[in-house]
Structure formats: structure tokens, C-alpha cells
Amino acid sequence: MRPSINPSGWSATAHHLCPRNNRLRMPLRLKTRLHIAALFLLLFAQVSCSKSSRPGSQTQASNQSAQKEPAAADSTKQAPDSARKPAEPTPYPGSAEPPPPAPVSPSGEPPPTNGAAPKAGAAPPPQEVLPRFPWPPPIPSARLSVPLNANSNNPTFGNLSFILDAALRKTGYFEKSYFSVPGGIAIVTKMERIYQDGTPVPVGRWSVEQPTLPRLSLSEYLRALFTASPGYYRMIVFVVTDKPFGATNETISASTANQWLADGFNILPEDILLKPLPPHFAFTALVYEFRREPGGKPYELEPSDLDARTHLTRCGLWAALHLQ
Amino acid sequence: MATAARLPKPSNIPTDGLMSLDSVRMKLAVVWLTGGGLVLVILVIQSLLSAYGTLTQEAWGWFLPTLMPTLGMIVTVLTYTALDPLASGSVVRRSFFGIALFLSILYLLLVSLTILIQPFATSSPEQRIGLMRTSNLWLGPVQGLVASSLGVLFVSKQKKES
């Protein structure tokens, strides 16, 4: 017999259509009860899940995704993941094992973790470990080992940082960031707009956008009216370490380089300031130069038309550091 | 024939308050060809020197509908009337010519200003194109007024005697 459909949606077979009508009601009641029980179970499971989850886990996840968004949005150059996320640990050359998840101090020792030896009732110490600079660094436009003298019998990272900081301020670099590298530190200056010869532009030096007419003259006006000259930008990274290093084959995008300034520390932690410099340290300047075509996005020049010494001379740092 | 003899002879000398249509058209044509040609030359040089980068096509997309319809009409009418001897007898009120001339100069100045102000107001090709698009807000209405006035002058064939 072909089954018929009753108004409740149940298929009524010959077995269900027996004279006793409550045969059909029983499964309906049972199903309703089962539905209610399932709803309660779901509610209970949801409440227990929300209680067991950590309060900061969602915030951390959103922060991580927010950090990845700018790098993903940047499509000028294919930069490595290590270059895009400098705050994350990167594998060091020569290390057979994968790197620890936390950054390292300039001495190469792993940083103390909060759960290592916490004192009862004491607040956890503030984390003063520099974020890592991408290592080995992305290929720079120009590189130079600067013969810098620390001017002290027992030079520390603090002495050298003080000398460099004074020179940077003298030449107009007031914003910088500190990173850790194997065996030392890295100082990243803010990206500046320069002329093609490496001289910083007098107006709109720190602006990523092309400035309007810099000075009112007929020649400048005609040049600005009929041409759209490309923009040149520069970021200098000073690396202080006694460990030899090379560079990756990947260039970086301007947005990644700009992100370095935000990711690094504004000052050096005290323990690093007092740490003595390695006896055979090298002070290396990595120059990242970018060119921006009219209507295009900036891309790294590799190599630069100028050498690193010319860059340092034109920006005034060579003289400010009293280099010969 | 006697009736025809009593009628005043057609004269090409305009009376007070009237101007020859030919001279009006010629003056307006000179204004438009000079102003439009100046903007055209600037835009060509800008395009050759890549002042608009990859957005050169957008710049010309703004320029062509801004000037070419009016310039095309002027040149077409002048070319047509060059072969029509009857067109020389038409006249135009001097006041109307003044209005048409004022509107034409105003429009050409606004178009030129959009390009000549770029070094002060913009710093990238995107901003230049943005400025051109913004200028359509005021160029559109003025262009409508100019087209109305010039359309009458360059299409009218009413003669002074009639």
C-alpha cells in the first residue's frame, strides 16, 4: 500500500492507521520531547564553551589578523613572510633547531618567561625584550660597514646608541625603532622622501605623498605642470653585531618597511643599554631605497643608483658621526 | 518690378546695436580656437611627458567632451558658411554677442584653470584626474549656457532685412 501523508507531516503506513488513533500521537510527543532535550543540550554546550574560553584569546586573534592585513593588502612586491611580520620569530642562520617562539636578547640568550620562576603574590615583570628584526635581513639597496668608534674604554650598547641618537637628531631623524638581531641590535630610521641624488627633500620630507609645488618659481611650476617625476624614498637600518650576516634574495615593500618603525621599541631596554659591546662588533648601515612611479606604488630599488656612503653623506649622517 | 525697386537695397553695413553674423562668428571662433588650442597643446605636452602616468586616457576622457563638441560645431559652421554667400547678410544684436563672448571666455578660463592649477593643488596623477572630475561640477552648467548661446549664433540665418 502506498503511504499517505497526514497533516502533521508524518507518513502514515498501514501499521500507523490502526483503529487506535493514539498510535500517531505517541511518536509526535516523543519527537517534541526529543527536540526540547536537544535544544537544552545545545544551550548547555554553548554556555560551557564560552566559560572555558580565555578572555583574551579573541583579542589576540583579532590583533594577529589586524597585523597580517596590511601585509596582505600590499601587493607591490612579493616579500617573504619573515619580512612582513618582523615581530614574529624568524629562524637564524645556522640554527639546526627551529627558533623559540619568543624574541631573543642581544646576547642571544632566550628571554625569561613569565612562568619560569614567578614569586608568589608579585606582579609579573614587564617584558622588555626587543622584537626581532627579520634575519637575515631583506636585501638592501646599499650596504656599508661604517667605521664607527664608540669613544669609550668599555663601550656598551647604550654608549653606541647615544652616539647614533645624537647624530640622528642632528640630521633630523627623530623617529626610530630598536630591534634585536643575533648578537646585537638594529636601529631603524623613519622612511624619508629624497631626491634622486640622495639629498632629503626640504619640504614634505616625511610625507609618503608627493608634495605640491615646493617653491614658487616659473621653472618649478612648468616642471610640475608638464611632468610627474617619480618619488624616491629611503629608510636606513643600522645593525650593530659581531655576527656576520648576509641578506635574503627578497626585496621588501614600502609598507613593510614602514611597519618596522611601528613594530620596534622606541627606546632600548635598560639591560641592553648596560650590556657591553662585543669586542669585534660591526656597525653596518643597510639602506633601503624605494622608487615610486607616477600613479604607481613604491618598490625597492635593488641595487640603488647610489652607494651607501653617498646616501649617508647626502643625509648628513656621515658628517654627524664624524666619519672619515 | 516697380515694387522691388522701392525696397531698400540689402546692405552689409550693420546698424547701431547690430553686428554682422559673419564677424560675430569669426570673433567667437578665434576665441574658441585660441583658448581650446592652448589647452590642447598643454594636454598633449603633458601626455608626452607622462604627467598623468598611467592615467593619460582618463585625462583625455575629460578633455574631449569638454571642448570638442563646441569646437566641432564652430569649425563645421564656419566651413559650411564659407561656401554660402547668403550667410553674409545676417546680423546679431551686439548685446547678445557680448553675452556669448563673456560666457565663452568664462568657460575657457575655467577649463584652463583646471589644468594650470594642477601644480599647486595636486601632487600625483590620481589627484590630477580627481581635480578634473571635480571641475565637471561647474563646467557642466557653464557649458550648457555656452552651448545655448553659441548654438543660436552659429545656426541662425535670419537676415537684417527680414
Image (spheres, helix red, strand yellow):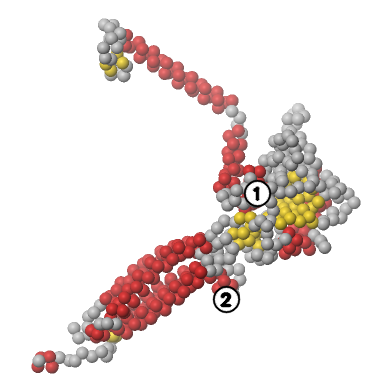
Q: What amino acid is found at the position of numbered circle 1 in the picture?
A: Glu
* Mark 1 closeness class: few <14, some 14–19, many ≥20 residues within 10 Å: some
Q: Chain of mark 1?
A: A
Residue at 42 percent across and 16 percent down: it is: A34
Q: Position of residue A126 (x, y in %)?
A: 73, 38
Amino acid at circle 2: Leu
Residue A186 locus on image (x, y percent): 74, 49
Up-down: is A9 above or below A128? above
Please give the residue where the numbered disc 2 appears in the rendered image. Answer: A218
Q: Quadrant of the N terminus of chain A?
A: top left
Provide the residue designation for mark 1: A250
Q: Quadrant of residue B20?
A: bottom left
Q: Residue at x 21, y 90 (%)?
A: B10
Q: Is residue A19 above or below residue A108?
A: above
Query: How far from the left and from the top, in percent, is residue B62?
Result: 42, 65
A299 left or right of B79 in image: right
Q: CA distance from mark 2 to mark 1?
A: 43 Å
**Identity of the residue drawn at 65% across and 51% down:** A251
Which residue is the extreme one toward the right? A153
Kindly state the secondary structure of the residue where label 2 is placed. Answer: helix
A265, above or below B96, in the image:
above
Inspect this view and state whether residue A220 appears: yes
Picture coordinates of residue A282, whole percent (x, y): 81, 51
Disc 2 or 1, which lies upstream in sequence?
2
